[in-house]
Amino acid sequence: MENISVDFGVLDWVAFFGYFILLSSIGYFAGKSHSRDNSGDYFLAGRTLPWYVVGSSYIAANISTDAFIGMVGSAMLFGIVVATPEWSSVIAFTFLIWIFIPFLLSAKVFTTPEFLEKRFNPQMRFFFALVTIITNVVAFLAATIYGSALLINGLFGIDIITAILLISAMTGLWSIWGGLKSVAWMDLLTVIIMIAGGISVTVFGLMYLSETGSIVDGFGVMVERNLATYGDWKTAVDSNIGNLLYGGTDTDTYNRLSVIQPLNHVTNPWTHWIFSFFFIGLWYTVINQFMIQRVLGAKNIWHARMGINLASIIKLILPFFLVLPGLIWFAARPDVMLGTWDEVKPAADMTYIHMIKELIPTFVKGILLAALFGAAQSTVSAVLASTYTIFTIDFYKNLIDKEASEKRQVHVGMISGIVFLLIAVALAIFITDLKISLFIYTQELYTFFAPPFSAVFLLGILWKRVNGKGAFTACVLGFALGITVKILASNGMVPDWLESYANQGLLNWAFCMVTCTVVSLMTAAPRPDQVTDNLTFNWRNMNIFEGTGGVWYKNVTFWWGLSVFGMCAIAFIFSVVLRP
């Protein structure tokens, strides 16, 4: 990353170190409050997390430094459609709130691989646990540490290796020492700082666009210029149409303010809205351990559901400070997109840093620095906690020492956490020479492992006839298909619509659904203990409204309905109302 020498004053450092000291204090006291002799306390915070911690920690685990940098940069290139995964996640949360939370909590499991063994077989537990650990360390831990170090290098000119070591030490400490309780309570502060800091960039950006310094006028200017109907803004879009749409030509048009894009869109075709839950959302929101772990640690079903409602509402807000800055900078600097695509992409990735340097006053820059550090800290802590939890529960206790004491499990978790962090540091150093977009890279990675697991988990919950052989076969063949399609796409051997990694994921998911169904029907039915009411749907006995609360402001249904309405309203505005 280019070093653009952002100047930080005394007040900026006061803001940052004030945040860091407060964050460390929370991590210390939260971690100190749990027993080192109880694995439930260490891995699941003793199942004591209140709804506001569940929701904020869920979001904090989801937003890393590369999201701040990568999403803003992608929005500079592609427009508001980059917000689609955030806004459409409300659909996934709907299934999580009303269907999957009751199953996961009633099963009383520590990890999602445990659930898969109960429903399918030990092979599925081992396979999913192994894939999760590998992807956590290689794709998420290493990538987040590297991306954060790259940012530090760009801001301060610190050597990239030193930055990697610094970030790793500062972000991994409290996760290993304090377990999920430290991680989750620290995330509450982090989300507040991320929202405050992120919104400030949008506010100052809109004020910059307006001649009068008005936020409302600035928003109007942003909308007008992103419609790209004249001047450099139109030229910027027209000259890059082939980079925005696979097979795009001069006769195609592109609406930067629409979340509904054609099937050959490079990143977010319209299929993402309708089908993304099934091939990515289900894995990411329900069976992804580093996200769902805070739900498993909730006090009860009401706190779990209300926590996800809070996460839904925050998800609706996130694009206004993770995506809108990209639209603002396009309105201010359309010339960034007037070069070749190889020049445009790295320049777009610098958008957020340039905005901090040019638009943000002192002290607020310190808050933003804290927000960026918090994003790295929360993601590294969440992924690390889930990784050592899965290793301890699904490998050590399940395969190596079935009689391991509670205290022994905690010690194994802490030691394995240190080892996984060191491996991630080594990998982060190794990839410093790779020229990749981390945001796009992680999005594409989902198409390999998310669709197979999403397909078999959904079928396994909905249909009692699905068995372990069908699930395992579908996952193995799904992985093979994902790799094959990616190789073919990289060599231009697929139709334009299949160039998009989102459509590749949809194809993979559909294939796995069919494979799992066919193989299950060709083999023996599951045992009765694999299809109990705690593991599969019993439509007659199911009570989805259990634990929804009483008065409206405590009612799960009310807040869920509000978030769904918000999603629909936003989708309507950014598909029908704002058009050239």
Image: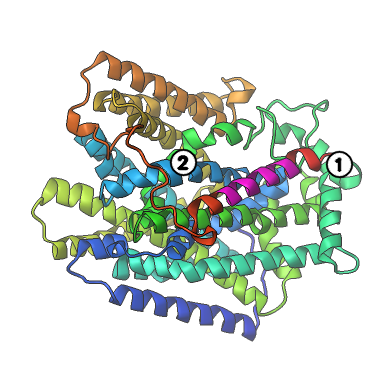
* Distance from the alpha carbon under mark 2 to that under mark 1: 40 Å
Residue 129 in the image, given as x and y percentages of width and height = 28, 43
Q: What residue span does the magenta drawing correspond to?
A: 561-573
Badge 2 vs badge 1, beta-carbon distance below 8 Å = no
For label 1, the residue is 234
Q: How many marks?
A: 2
Is residue 484 in view from this perspective?
yes
Colour scheme in use: rainbow
For label 2, the residue is 95
Q: Residue at x 79, y 62 (%)?
A: 206
* Residue type at tag 1: Lys
Q: Mark 2: which secondary structure?
A: helix
Horizontally, residue 182 falls left or right of residue 409, namely right
Above or below, 61 against 493 in this view is below
Please name whichever residue, 21 or 223, is drawn nearer the observer in this view of the structure. 223
Counting residues from the N terminus, which is met first, the one under dot 2 or under dot 1? Answer: 2
Please name whichever residue, 174 or 45, is drawn nearer the observer in this view of the structure. 45
Task: Check residue 563 for magenta coloring.
Answer: yes
The outermost residue toward the front is 551
Task: Check residue 50 for magenta coloring.
Answer: no
Q: Residue at x 76, y 42 (%)?
A: 256
Q: Residue at x 55, y 69 (%)?
A: 192
Q: Mark 1: which secondary structure?
A: helix
Residue 519 in the image, given as x and y percentages of width and height = 30, 18
